[in-house]
Amino acid sequence: MANFKLNINGKKQDVNVDPSTPILWVLRDSLQLVGTKYGCGIAQCGACTVHINGAAMRSCQLPVSAVGDKKITTIEGLSENGTHALQKAWIEHDVPQCGYCQAGQIMSASALLKDNPNPSDADIDAAMHGNICRCGTYTRIKAAIKTASKIG
Amino acid sequence: MSKIKTSFGRRSFLKSSAVAGGGMMLGFSWLASCQSKTEEEVMAMPKEWFEINSYLKIGDNGIVTILSPNPEFGQNVRTSMPMLIAEELDVDWKNVIVEQANYHPENYGFQFTGGSRGIMSRWEPLRMTGASARHMLREAAAKAWQVPLDEITTDAGVLYHKVSNKSAGYGEMASAAAEIPVPEEVKLKEVKDFKIIGKSHKNVDAKSIVTGEPMFGVDFQKEGMLIAMIEHPPAFGMTLKSIDDTEAKAMPGIKDVVSVKSYKDGFEKGGFDTNAFSEIVAIVGNSTWEVMQAKKKLKIEWQLIEAYSETVVGFRGDKKTVNIPAGLESTTSHQIQMEALAAKPGKVVRKDGNPDKAFKDAAKIIERTYSAPFLAHNCMEPMNAFAHVQGDKVHVAAPLQIPALIIPTIASSLDIPVENIQMDLTRMGGGFGRRAYAHYIVEAALISKQVNAPIKLIYTREDDMTNGIYRPTYQATYRAALDKNNNLTALHIKAGGVPESPLFANRFPAGALDNYLAEEWSIDSNITIGAFRAPRSNFMAGAEQSFLDEIAEAAGKDPIQFRLDLLQRAAENPVGEKNDYDAERYAGVLKLVREKSNWDQTPSNVSRGVSAYFCHSTYAAHILDLTLEEGKPVVQKVCCAIDCGIVVNPDAAKNMAEGAITDGIGNALYGELTFKDGAPEKKNFDTYRMIRMGEAPKEIEVHFVQNEINPTGMGEPPFPPIFGALSNAIYKASGKRHYQQPFLGTKKVIG
């Protein structure tokens, strides 16, 4: 066990965990930030996507010891009161079915829009390839990303 | 005007102080607070609630809380079921807060999510709930104003007596209404008077979902809660022999290692107690990561099972004996067994006319065999459950589809009375049938009992994918006899699978043909299977609809017209009496999809496939437009027509259809679980191929047949036919017909 000072959603957080612990489990177990989801544990499904210094990363494969003072942003910290353009677009398009993957989808999409405010279909396909939606809401996810890119 | 006696489900109207809201709202507000509230909304919360019946409470300021009874797994019943109540209550949807009911069959009836039965089974009871509450509010107003009841009208949460120009919000009358006896009879609205039903309403949970609020089973937290994980045998046909837990127990954060036997000896299993691994090892510790690490240090010896038989009590109380063979099964050995059985006569399930003679006299016979592999459900949220056993009581909170059917099992395994089980229904991160088999809750409860602490059991993805309860592997051989004028004179289906047959002998095209034979076979297995979105239909539709296209082509007919001709025959002069479809509604979706897709003017740059199917009381037809890019199929568009009667929440229903279409395309192209020596060969998403963003259809259009028939299923019906539409479009594009799913298996290339 070791102490880590993390920068999560703009707040300093002290945690005492094994250095190999993935950020996913630090968020979920130590900090009760459970919006970030466990889906596969091997960075294949994207449910655990967070931002590390603004880049989308799979938190299930990212040990706490590798993060240092980099800024971690989770779905809970993406915006105040769920007002990010993507969150609003997700509601407007009524995207979710079960909803389990959607936080990860939104975190991948928000990283995409930050780098590429007007993505093409191919850009969206590439950026979102790592996020599985078992319910099959892909067409709505794509439409919501396009809506957000227009208003964002 | 439909008048309905409230005696139907009258117990639902019992007022229940603790159960209807209190417990959930106070103790587990994180589960209940699913419609995110802004600060203004919180400020607008009432000072006092008045419980009108177990489904609804009205606040002194007119805010209405509706308890949604059924478990939610993405079908959006937490919006559509409260809509049914709100419609008849005649309240402004803006003033409705939705909460999840916990498990309480006396208050909430059969809280069942599956079989596409949710809205169908709740259509009248929930509307009646709203209508009886409205009646009580009107009576309260009539009393207060000393005017005749008949003169009290309502609109959007306000009571009016127009003659005397009096009005009052529901909140003002709620206290008095709560004292009024439940009416013996209520009137339900006419379809034309609906204000909420039939108009799209946003998912009440959308805000919570997009902001990452805790709502799923796996999000459950409780003070002092430990984390548990399991090890089950690495292969079907194996069971626990011995455990060496020395090293695992010495790992940091680990509290205990226990073995769990899920069923008491002699326990008579129900149809949803399916479980290949009834003896497992559980490891319990402080945090998920510590438990995951220590789990790898468990040294467990497994041994082969012996063959056995068990009696299983079915859904309707019928008992059947299931034979579980010993041995380690493999996909290759299944295939050999299936070929062998398919070559022999099967069990005749239906025979019309004289198919033998028709085949003997045929000018042409077409014979094709279709097959599909086992599939894993792969819900994004792996199986999990919270349990806390204290003495002879247990509190569980878990994502599951059929609470009522696991309650007796929990009671038996813990040796406690059923009334000592408190169960909260969390949101499910997908279900697809998998969470109808809630053995993981029994496991969680037994673990909690042994370690004497509240625990949350979580399956790893690997544990989830290798646990069983799969969609079975199936095979079907179709034969068609054509006369010299290319008329279809007989059809013969022989279908089977491991371990069940997928056959529906009385479905279309049965009834449309003078000579018809349906046979089936099955092969016992120790690999467990379970309901998977539209069980059996999810294979039969693809096989049947591909074969109908092959016959149409051989007969030189347009594939839609060919189907419509058969349906016309079935409508006008049906063969046999057991045909379980309405030929005119079946034809209706085909005609609608033909019109909406401009079938007669197919764009030259795409290849089109059509398919239609009837299951779960709903008719669905698809036309799929496909192109080949570097030999790979790309779905450009799917046009879909559905007849599910009245559509309660149209945009949410469209979402279901879009999801079913994408899910079906994914499974048809990629879905496959194979076995070697009893072990699943895929354990996670690196090898189990799921459909991803770039492979989904670029566009999906959903059309509903407009009618006033009571609603039927929506979750499953659009799923099965898409397999056929895809197969037929690929054939048009490539000239190659795929007979084995997945169409893009690892060794198969299109073109």
Image (spheres, coloured by chain):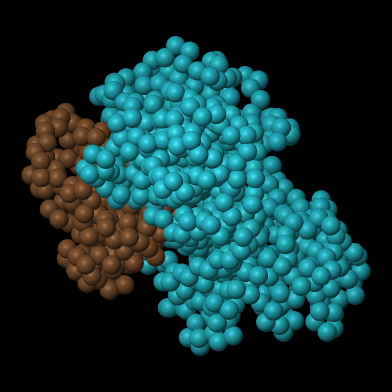
**Residue B279 x, y percent position in the rendering:** 52, 26
**Is A57 left or right of B727, judged from the image as shown?**
left
Q: Observer-nearest residue: B166 or A98?
A: B166
**Residue B671 x, y percent position in the rendering:** 50, 57
**Residue A51 x, y percent position in the rendering:** 18, 52
For chain A, give the colour. brown
**Is B162 left or right of B215, judged from the image as shown?**
right
Residue B530 visible within the image:
no
Q: Observer-nearest residue: B176 or B651?
A: B176
Q: How many marks?
A: 0
Q: Observer-nearest residue: B77 or B351?
A: B77
| Residue at left offset 48%, top offset 70% | B701
For chain B, give the colour. cyan
| A34 is higher (above) or lower (below) than B496 | above
| B11 is higher (above) or lower (below) than B541 | above
| Residue at left offset 32%, top offset 19% | B255
Q: Extreme front residue here? A: B164
| Residue at left offset 53%, top offset 23% | B410
Q: Extreme top residue here? A: B391
Q: Observer-nearest residue: B39 or B384?
A: B39
| Residue at left offset 46%, top offset 16% | B393
**Residue B422 x, y percent position in the rendering:** 46, 23
| B30 is higher (above) or lower (below) than A46 | above
Task: Tell me where residue B484 sits by quadrant.
Answer: bottom right
| B558 is higher (above) or lower (below) than A37 | below
Residue B153 visible within the image:
yes
